Image (cartoon, coloured by chain):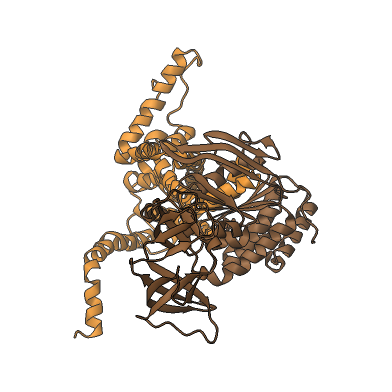
Amino acid sequence: MEQTLSDGRGHSLDLKGIGHAFGATVALDEINLAVAAGELIALLGPSGCGKTTMLQIIAGFLRPSKGEVRFDGARVEHIPANRRRIGMVFQNYALFPHLTVFENVAYGLRARKAAKDVVAAKVEQMLGLAQMAAYARRLPGELSGGQQQRVALARALAIDPGLVLLDEPFSALDKNLRLDMQIEIKSLLKTFGVTSIIVTHDQEEALSMADRIVVLNKGRIEQIDSPDALYDRPASLFISSFIGHTNLLRGTVTETDRVQLDAGPEIDLGRSVQRRRGTPVTISVRPENIAFGAERPGAIPVTIRATVPLGAVSVTEGITASGEAVKISQARAAGIAKAQTGDAAWLSINDTSRVSVFSTPIDDLSKHQQRSV
Amino acid sequence: MNPAGTSASREMLPVVPLAALFFAAFVLPLIALVAVSLFRTPEFADLSPAQYLRFFADPFSIKVLTDTLWLGAEVALATLILAYPLALVYVASGPFMRTLITFLIMLPLLTSTVVRTFAWIVILGRDGIINSAMLSLGFWQAPARLLYTWQGMVLALTQIQLPLMALPVINSLLRLDGNLTRAAEGLGASRARIFITVILPLTLPGAIAGWLLVFAAAATAFITQTLVGGGRIILMPSYIYQQAVGVQDWPFSAALSLIFTLAVTGIVFAIGALSRRYLRGVDAA
C-alpha cells in the first residue's frame, strides 16, 4: 500500500434532502447521498440530469434551494467556494493561460499566502507526481491535452483538498488517451486518499473510475451501487440501457418465475419476478449473456441480420419473429462458425439470474433517451 | 478564359471608388501638408526644415505637445478606471440589464459632440448645476471655477469618450472563460486577488485597445478641448487652428499637424507593439 500524501485527509460528504430549482425548473429533487472519506464516486447521467448542478452545490458555487451539505458532519452551505478546501478539475481544465505550469500549480498555495519555499517545494512535489516536472516553465497553450489535464489535477491537489471534484475530465481527450489517463488519475487520487467525485455522462468513464456510481436522471437519484452491481442488477430500465449495451425484449408474466416472450419462447427465470400473472414486462439481457444454441424449450428463434467484428469480440444481430432486434456478443475464437446473413438460428440465455425484469414499457424508455440527446 | 492579370484586376474593381476617394481626400492633402510644412516663410518661400527646427527650439510649443499627450493619457486612464466596474456589472447582469447598460453606453454616441460638450458647459458653468447645488446646500460659499479648467476638461472628455473604452473592455470580459474565475475561487483566491491575477491580465488586450482609442480621441478632441477649455488652455488642436486661421502661418501649422500626428500614432503603435510582445499566452485563452 502506497502511503497517502495529503495531511488533511479526505472529507466525508453527506447530502441530505438537497433540492434545487432554477425558477420554475426543478434541477434537483430530494438528493440523499453519503460519501465515505477517500471514496471515489461517479455522478453519472445524461445531460440535463442535474449532475452539474449537484457539483456546483458541493463546490459552493451554488447554494441549494433546500437541504443540507455536510463535510465531515459539519454543515457548509454558508461557506463560499474559496473557503471550502475543494480541488476542482474542469472539463476544459481551466488552466490560467497567462501563467506557467509552475505558477498554475502554485496559484492555490499563493492564494493561501504560503511561504515562498513551501510553495516551491509543494509545486515541485506535485509536478513530480503528475510527471510534469520537465514542463514547469511552459505555458498551458504549449501542452497537449493529456499534459494539461495532469497540470489541472496537480493544481487541484496542491492545496491538499479534502474533496476533489472532476467535471467531465476526460471528454476533451482523444479516445486512445482516455483509458491511460483514467488509470493514471485514478491511481493518483487513490494515492492521495482524497475523497473524489467525478461527474460524467460517459458510462465507461464511470465504470472504470468509480468505487460507487450514482445514476442521476431528471434530477433524481435512480441508483447508487458499485459498477458491477449496477451492470448486473440495474434498478430500472433506464439504467439497464444507459449502462453498457443490452437487449430489451417484450413479454408477459405467465407464472411467478416464468415470462412468455413476444419473440416466441417462454423462459424460466429461476426466481420470482414479483409480478402478477398477465403483467406485461420488459426483460433486459446483456449481449454477452446470449449464445447460439440448438432448438430447445426457452431458445429464441431469430433470423441473422449481420455480424460485425469488434476486435476482441464479434457482435451478431438477429431479428425475432416479433420484429425485435437481439445482439449477441461472442469472444472471437477459432472453431465458431460465422453466422451468415439470412440464416435461421436459435439463441439461448446463458445465465437467467442476470436477466432483469422491468414493468416499464420500452416506449417510455425512448422518451428518456430523447431527453438525453 | 480571361488571362490571369485581367481577372485579378476585375476582382479589384469594386474597391476603386473607395481607393480613389481615399487618395483624393487623404493621401493628396497629406502630401500637400508635408510640402507646405517645408517652406521657410508663410509666403511659401525657400524650401527648408526651418518650421521643425523652430518647433523643437521653442519650449512653449513642446509644452503644448506634451500637455496634449498627457491629457489623452489622463482621460484614457480615467475611462479605464470607470470602465472595469461597469463591465463587471454588465457581465454579471441578466439580459434586460445588459440591454439597458448597452443602451446607456451607446446613448452619448447618438448625440453630437457639440451637444454633449454644451451639456458639460451647463453643468460646470459659473451658474451651472454643480455650483448652484453646492451654493444652495451651503457646502460652498462662493461659486467654484469648474469650467475652463484642466480638471473640467478631463471630466467632460472622460464622459464623452467612455463608450470607446467600455465596449472593448466588456467584449474581452465576455470572452473570458467563466471556469477560470471559478477555478481561481475554488483554489481559495479572494475577489480582489481573482481580479488582479486572472481577470485583469486576461482582459488587458481589450483594455489596451480601449486605452489607445480614448488616448487618440481625447488628445485630438478639438471641439471639447476648445469649448470646455475655453481658450485658456492651449493644446495642439487649438494651437494648430490658431496658427493656420489666426496667424495665417500655414507652413508652421502644417509642421505642427505632422508632428502631432506622428506623436499620437507613434505612441499608439509603440504601445500596441509592446503589449503584443509582453502579453504572453493571453490570446491563447
Q: Position of residue B207 (x, y in %)?
A: 49, 49
Q: Classify B238 as above or below A184.
A: above
Q: Nearer the viewer, residue A180 or A161?
A: A180
- Is residue A332 or residue B74 the one in the foreground? A332
Using the image, determine if residue A335 lies above or below residue B222.
Answer: below
Question: Is residue A353 visible from the viewing direction of this image?
Answer: yes
Q: Name the quarter where the C terminus of chain A is drawn.
A: bottom left
Q: In the drawing, does residue A143 fall left or right of residue A154?
A: left
- How many numbered badges does the structure rendering display? 0
Residue B281 appears in the figure: no
Give x and y (percent) for residue A247.
Answer: 44, 64
In this rendering, would B241 be left or right of B264? left
Q: Nearer the viewer, residue B74 or A80?
A: A80
Q: Is residue A216 left or right of residue A2?
A: left
Residue B69 in the image: x percent, y percent?
A: 49, 47
Color used for chain A?
brown
Chain B's colour is: orange
Give the residue displayed 53% in from the left and 55% down from the top: A234
